[in-house]
Amino acid sequence: MAPLPQEQQAVEAAARAAYDACHPDDSFDDLKRRAAFSKEDRFLLADWLAATERKLRGAPDRHSAHSVG
């Protein structure tokens, strides 16, 4: 397998750290393995990577961009 571009490696490393911190009974690597055969896990993985990429680029969180009230 070809190495990931440097930016993609940074996104994956940050997503791994965040996912592992939020899911003490699971791991990012296990999620990646399950994503190979589970549609739900494939979308969950994509969501974690996309959210992490947005955060690293400094984009606002889609869920906190709107004020309630």
Image (spheres, grey):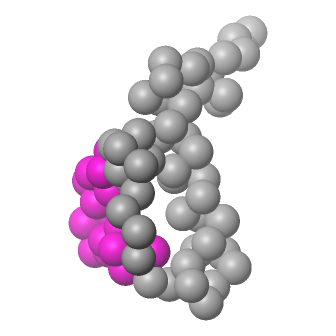
- Our reading of the magenta stretch's main secondary structure is helix
Q: Residue at x 44, y 83 (%)?
A: 33
Closest to the observer: 5 or 69? 5
Drawn side of residue 66 relative to residue 32, left or right? right
| 7 is higher (above) or lower (below) than 32 | above
Q: Quadrant of residue 29?
A: bottom left
x and y percentages locating residue 49 in the rendered image: 51, 50
Closest to the observer: 24 or 37? 37
x and y percentages locating residue 45 in the rendered image: 54, 63
Residue 22 visible (yes or no):
no
* Quarter containing the C terminus: top right
Q: Residue at x 59, y 63 (%)?
A: 44
Residue 14 visible (yes or no):
yes
Q: Quadrant of residue 4?
A: bottom left
- Span colored in magenta: 13-32
x and y percentages locating residue 60 in the rendered image: 58, 19
